[in-house]
Image (cartoon, coloured by chain):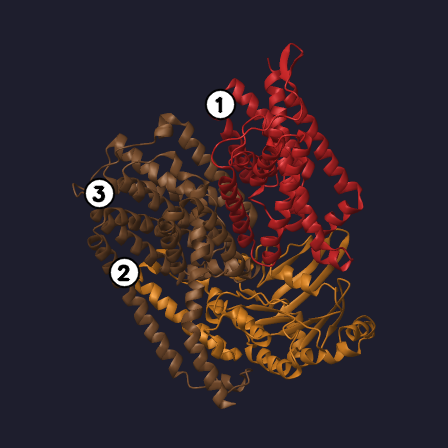
Amino acid sequence: MNASKLAMPQSPTLPTAAPVRRTRATTLVSWLIWPALLVLVIALAQGIDNNYWLQIAVNAEIMVIAAVGLYVTFGLSGQVSLGQAGFYAIGGYTTGLLVTTLGFDFGLALVLGVILSGLVGLGLGIPSLRLRGNYLALATLGFGQVVALILVNWTWLTGGANGIRNIVAPIVAGFELKTVPDWAMFIGVVAVLSVFVVTRIKNSSYGRAMQAVRDSDVAASSMGVSLSQVKVLAFVVGAIFAGLAGALNAGFVTYVSPGTYDLSLSVTILAMIVVGGAASPWGAVIGAIVLTFLPEVLRPVQEYYLLIYGILLLLVVAFAPGGIWNLFRLVGSLPARFRTRARTGDQS
Amino acid sequence: MIIQPLVSGLAIGGIYALLAVSFLLTYRVSGVLNFAQGEFVMVGAFVASTVAGIAGIPLIAAALLGVGAAAFAGVAMERVTYRPLRNKPHASMIISTVAVGIVLTQAAQLIWGPNPRTLPSLVPNVSIDFLGSRISTVSLFLIVISAVLIVALHLVLTKTRLGRQLEATSVDSDTAQLMGIRTGRLVIIAFAISTGLAGVAGILVAPMFSVTVGLGVLIALKAFAACVIGGFGNLPGAAIAAVGLGVVENLAGTFIGTDSKDLIAFGLMIAFLIVRPQGIFGAKVGEKL
Amino acid sequence: MSQLAATTSTDQALVISGLTRRFGGVTALNGVSLGVALGETRALIGPNGSGKSTLINCVSAVDRWDEGTVTLGGAPIKGRDPVGAARRGISRTFQTLRLFDEMTVLENVMVAMHHARGYGLFSAITLGPRFRKAENRMRHEARELLALTGVERDAERQAGTLPYGHRRLVEIARSLALKPTLLLLDEPAAGLNDTETARLAELVRRIARPDLSILVVEHNMEFVTSVASQVTVLDNGNIIAEGTPAEVREHPEVLRAYLGSSEDDK
């Protein structure tokens, strides 16, 4: 096709060698990052000999899983969920109950807990489809409250305020995680896999459809994208990862109790994405790590931590809507921008 | 036998209703779903209880100052949430109001500390006999004040020039602006009235519970639920649903047990979202949502 | 003569008959009947508020209608089911641009291929052969469409950052990615300068194929004359004239209804 004759943009087509090479380089980096991350989490698990900090690191990895899942729901498809703690609780409690009352292996209990979270997500997501923006936030808020109240009040099932203790079982067929470094390694690998899966979703047609629905639902549906399927899928993915995080947490700390699963956990998971940046799964990763370590760093001024956290959230939303990730990208793109400006300057 | 829980239910329902209409007011005029509404309940109660503790200041003055403080905080909130974010995706606004809630809670925690405070009721607490049941004057006072305020707000919104301007802004802000309505100022007024009413709710409930940073949280969540049950964008509908919710909760608490009392509100809310998202009185889920 | 035969024969791609759409007390479309043959480019003109956009919204099933039927290739289109319409081969652009602003231009075009992606979630996550093959094919086709519309250099740019004229072209590329049998262009030349409009006309003529029907809503009569063989004139929800651009231009009703108000547009 002689498209060039028709080309509307004024400038003639420049040789495209440079961009292609850069794309190839970025592709290479984007593949090397996965083995590198696996090495990193294993090195952290073996290298941090302070148990306290290793536990914080494991907590961060668990939050990475929950946050990267909500990235699909909120970052990709634009649905605000204030009920992730509910899914986290379902994952944790299901795992705990199956291990302690039915003597399941931890791995099997975890899989079932994740499946149940996903099913509940499906059950909540399908009716919520009809709800736009604000309404979904309310529905998920209500869902989180219902779960939190059930945890406290349905003592026969959930153990009430005491929760479920002693969730200790081999992962599968006698293979056991005994020490904190064991758990750190296991959860670290799961976290890396979670980020990988979410990145795959983002870079597939599904991810594009989710973003399309977020940016313009009318245009997306006119281009043949079913809003309901895409939104429910994104919501269920968020629920599944929250459930996975909850189940891993239950196994790691060996108990679950209702205090953990309140609205502030849901807000924290959402805040991780906002602070880290909703435009990329790496934003969710950064946000999860930053907000897990922040209270530790601010320990000397502990009583101000939540105030600082609230103000930080307020400032990021108003003045840095792209979050930390976007700041990184801006800094990273400065040299390239400078070069481009210099080159166009030369030509004119 | 049934009178006493009924009156208590009406009293707490009145509080839910007060918060529900205040919540809907800002939502209608500015499109902001204020997830920090409950924190203004706490602000009003804390300020009033502090001022009331100073010798020589009459209780009514303390109460008015509490309401004023809540309204003032609401105006400040408009500046940090609505003003910079009005053209951004609604998700930013939701997160921003949640953040304001965190900031207010933590600021209150730092200022007033963890110990609960008390705030006496504006009317003496006397039990009176009514059809063989003993009911408290505090409950009756709550019912009367919230009813009066909700009716007054409704009249202001439907009968006055300010009300018509607020309505115009809520229907179509751009057109309203073209018609010479200063929509920016109206949004501030809506925030002030809304958070002021939340402050009133705080001063009314404080004598029943004690004043803590968490005072408004559950009340606000119940008010959200009532808005969904009654129908968004329908102030009288939400108020009726809120009162009904208070009554149902209290009767259930008395006759079934307190275990599942709090579940009723959120269970109903989710049931409505699934079966009838427009609520009992709403026509249709508006496009604004 | 042959053209006349084509428009009246039964091999019409799009047939709209008796279409009525009311908004409250206002009748936006009043029993409109209209056909577009396979391979035909038909223009729909009319003053502001004459119902053109309502018609496009009905045919693309973004909106519903009160009476009448819309059929494509003989089978009826259901109202308020834009996904169904899209999968039947009805594609469109929007008068007020609706690109996916946060995505790249290439991704924008690829969204329209989602329903024909040919792989599942599992294949996407595990980077299966179906996924890789389909993605390469989609990427390649999307680049071709961007080349066709002349915006291939913008492929990796974020759509929201493009200049206005380019965004219009990306929308056309995206609508073609659906592989439509009926393409609805809603005021594609709005906001473009004369040079850009002329290039756009050239593009519309280029994308015309024997198996594609095009219905273009436009104000600019010069543009209409240069792309469309047939013109339908809508006024107040009624069709007041039909014919070649030359015929329509002379039509007394059209002069009265349309030209008067097109002065206002300028």
- Quadrant in the rendering for residue A32: bottom left
Q: Secondary structure at mark 2?
A: helix
**Marks 1 and 3: which is nearer the front?**
1
As rendered, which of B229 and B194 lies closer to the eye?
Answer: B194
Protein chain holding label 3: A
In the figure, is residue B79 to the left or right of A250?
Answer: right
Structural crowding at the residue carrying mark 1, measured as other residues with C-alpha within 10 Å and reported as few (<14), some (14–19) or many (≥20): some
A133 up-or-down from B67: above or below: below
Hue used for the chain lettered C: orange
In percent of the image, x 60 and y 22: which residue is there? Answer: B8
In percent of the image, x 36 and y 25: which residue is there? Answer: A156
Q: Which labelled disc corresponds to residue A37? A: 2
Please state the horizontal and vertical placement of residue A47, each as a whole percent of the image: 20, 55
In the figure, is residue A57 to the left or right of C135?
Answer: left
B98 up-or-down from A19: above or below: above
Q: State the CA–CA distance, disc 2 to disc 3.
A: 23 Å
- Residue at the spot of label 3: A171
Q: State the CA–CA distance, disc 2 to disc 1.
A: 50 Å
